């Protein structure tokens, strides 16, 4: 009736139980960098700024077509993390949305045989203030922005800003759209608009991406928010920003960023510890070339002025 | 008669544990066949037995190792020594203001549980208060249950008592399908469909709020409630129904006066498992509640839940930092909440069996 011998087959099948394959961690040979040697891929560690991480990723992908022999491995974590990596040697290129401080330069020199870290300015980031397209607001000052966003700030209603009615809006309340609290953009906005010592007012809608901010504002007539200039869509409006109330307000653009009239724009840097090896130098030259700067523009940042 | 009642228990625990010894002893034919088997097949059987036992207890191993891991990451918070803030260190903190490393501060459990200020990455004053997040989680869950309980239990009663044949089968399949929709899809619906509807229908300034999250969670927990609720109604013996009808009860009276009281433990378990689902849900609430640290005044205010906070912040908190550990402590908190809810549900189910 039943074949008991199948148990033997079963036993054999069980004998095929999985074994663990151990994969060794390949030692990186970025430092001796012989460039794009035939077939061998040299990897370069590129760590730092969250704001720049998408841009750096886009560069890395595009550069792979230019030089398949070099693989740029990009990771975020913040400018501070990139600079720490630069000092302790884990980052061959550090992305930073701020300049190195003198003490960091000293530390880096001490760790890398006395050579100064090299700084490359690779583009600018202009933070734009967005409102719904039907919102009549055209300009805003940094002080007003601070009152809207900071802890203890007094502006909570659109009428406080002189906006009487927004078509489609529900009530007078300002819905503040912000970013998650470890975003580089969040930190920059806090630093420039709220002040280093301040904090955001609780209760803002904290979204996880630059694009989400713009999309949510597009659907929310009561909203205001900040995001990169490149994320603008026809469903939202960019508001002109003035340094102080009464001063002329400025529209973010490549031009106003470069002539420094737009108040919430900042340069973006890449750093190497000392003079970089040829394959990294080649990458950085490409980043600052027209091809690399086109990607800056395409990803919504501001490219360097043409020489 | 008494013998018949006890057969189930006699067969229950003893038989499956030692199937071979019992069977071999009773049946000489089997004993003969067994003797004829080779050592390999016997060993094979032993291996399979061991593997199956391992599968059986694996859940326990997993739960305990997850518990251990989450605790291990959170516990150092309580033993960290307050760092002496020499002037030099204070200056260093100042200089590193651009790092995402917050200034050091002694962790206080009281602040964690009772402060509504959640500023884990502040540069001047780091505060880890999760009260607003707890209230956020609770408000969304409670509202979700207010919506889901009548729907879920109503559907369970209908499926179990009022419809038959094809309708019942179709309904059960569709309700199970509802359970199969991934939570990110629910979140997307909340973000794109519910958001404008809530704004226009209720004149809310923003449609990403408690109500939006609660409706999604209600829809997500209804299937669990229906299937467990239906099971527990089915478990009520038919003699109860017959007795009710014999006494001249209408269908409604039968449900209301007989079936629901008889199945109340199971129905309670259904509700509590729904609550567990709602408390632990992450993706949908992350997308639909607005993710704002806020103690809501109304159901139209955006809030943030415990789960969503972990999801949004853990990826970028540097490992071993205070922020990272606090996020794990939130994990412990969630673990405790869901454990209590599930244990209560379990005890409620046991309650039925004992009857």
Image: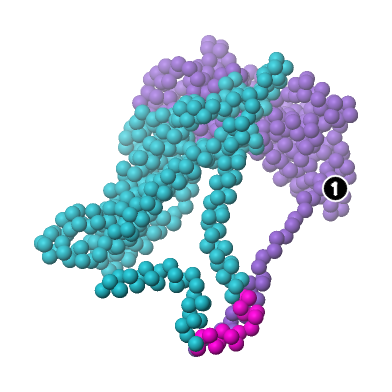
The structure residue drawn at horizontal position 65% and vertical position 36%, both measured from the top left corner, is B320
The structure residue drawn at horizontal position 23% and vertical position 61%, both measured from the top left corner, is B162
Residue A211 in view: no
Chain (cyan) = B
Residue A7 in view: yes
Quick one: B12 or A44, which is closer to the camera?
B12
Q: Which residue is mark 1?
A: A36
The structure residue drawn at horizontal position 26% and vertical position 74%, both measured from the top left corner, is B1
The subunit carrying tag 1 is A
User: Badge 1 local density, few (<14 within 10 Å), some, or many (20+)?
Assistant: some
Chain A on-screen colour? purple
Could you say where residue B229 lies in the image, as x and y percent from the top left? Answer: 32, 56
Q: Which residues are magenta?
A: B29-44
Assign the magenta stretch its main secondary structure.
Answer: helix
Res. B187 image quadrant: top left
Q: Residue B36 in magenta?
A: yes
């Amino acid at each position: 009736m039943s074949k008991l011998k199948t148990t033997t087959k079963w036993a054999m099948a069980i004998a095929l139980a999985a074994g663990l394959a151990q994969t060794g961690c390949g030692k990186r040979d970025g430092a001796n960098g012989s460039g794009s040697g035939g077939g061998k891929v040299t990897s370069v560690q590129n760590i730092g700024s969250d704001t720049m991480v998408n841009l750096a990723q886009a560069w890395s992908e595009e550069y792979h077509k230019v030089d398949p022999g070099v693989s740029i491995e990009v990771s975020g974590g913040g400018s501070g993390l990139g600079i720490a990596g630069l000092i302790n040697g884990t980052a061959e290129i550090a992305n930073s949305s701020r300049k190195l401080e003198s003490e960091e330069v000293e530390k880096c020199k001490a760790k890398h045989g006395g050579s100064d870290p090299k700084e490359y300015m690779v583009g600018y980031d202009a933070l734009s203030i967005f409102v719904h397209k039907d919102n009549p607001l055209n300009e805003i000052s940094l002080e007003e922005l601070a009152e809207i966003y900071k802890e203890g700030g007094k502006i909570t209603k659109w009428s406080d800003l002189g906006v009487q009615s927004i078509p489609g809006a529900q009530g007078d309340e300002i819905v503040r759209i912000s970013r998650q609290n470890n975003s580089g953009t969040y930190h920059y906005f806090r630093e420039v608009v709220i002040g280093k010592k301040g904090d955001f007012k609780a209760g803002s809608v904290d979204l996880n991406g630059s694009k989400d901010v713009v999309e949510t504002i597009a659907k929310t007539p009561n909203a205001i928010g900040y995001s990169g200039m490149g994320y603008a869509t026809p469903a939202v409006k960019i508001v002109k920003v003035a340094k102080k109330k009464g001063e002329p307000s400025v529209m973010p653009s490549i031009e106003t960023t470069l002539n420094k009239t737009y108040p919430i724009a900042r340069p973006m840097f890449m750093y190497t510890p000392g003079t970089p090896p040829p394959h990294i130098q080649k990458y950085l030259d490409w980043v600052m070339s027209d091809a690399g700067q086109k990607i800056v523009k395409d990803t919504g940042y501001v490219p360097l002025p043409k020489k | 008669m008494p013998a018949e009642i006890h057969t189930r228990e006699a067969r229950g625990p003893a038989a499956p544990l030692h199937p071979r010894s019992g069977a071999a002893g009773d049946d000489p034919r089997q004993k003969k066949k067994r003797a004829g088997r080779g050592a390999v097949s016997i060993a094979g059987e032993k291996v399979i037995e061991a593997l199956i036992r391992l599968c059986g207890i694996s859940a326990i191993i997993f739960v305990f190792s997850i518990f251990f891991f989450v605790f291990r990451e959170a516990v150092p918070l309580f033993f960290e020594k307050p760092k002496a803030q020499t002037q030099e260190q204070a200056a260093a903190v100042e200089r590193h203001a651009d790092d995402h490393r917050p200034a050091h501060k002694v962790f206080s459990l009281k602040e964690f549980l009772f402060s509504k200020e959640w500023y884990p990455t502040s540069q001047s004053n780091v505060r880890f208060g999760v009260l607003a997040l707890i209230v956020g989680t609770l408000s969304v869950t409670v509202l979700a249950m207010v919506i889901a309980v009548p729907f879920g239990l109503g559907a369970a009663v209908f499926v179990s008592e009022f419809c038959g044949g094809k309708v019942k089968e179709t309904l059960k399949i569709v309700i199970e399908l509802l359970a199969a929709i991934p939570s990110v899809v629910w979140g997307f619906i909340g973000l794109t469909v519910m958001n404008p509807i809530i704004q226009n229908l209720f004149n809310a300034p923003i449609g990403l709020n408690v109500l939006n999250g609660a409706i999604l969670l209600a829809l997500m927990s209804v299937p669990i409630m229906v299937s467990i609720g239906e099971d527990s109604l089915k478990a009520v013996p038919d003699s109860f129904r017959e007795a009710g009808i014999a006494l001249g009860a209408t269908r409604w009276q039968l449900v209301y006066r007989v079936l629901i009281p008889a199945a109340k433990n199971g129905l309670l378990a259904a509700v509590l498992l729904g609550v567990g689902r709602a408390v632990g849900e992450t993706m949908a609430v992350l997308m639909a509640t607005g993710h704002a640290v806020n103690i809501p005044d109304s159901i139209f205010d955006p809030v943030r839940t415990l789960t969503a906070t972990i999801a949004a912040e853990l990826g970028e908190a540097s490992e071993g930092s205070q922020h990272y550990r606090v996020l794990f402590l939130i994990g412990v908190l969630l673990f405790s909440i869901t454990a209590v809810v599930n244990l209560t549900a379990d005890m409620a189910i046991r309650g039925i069996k004992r009857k």
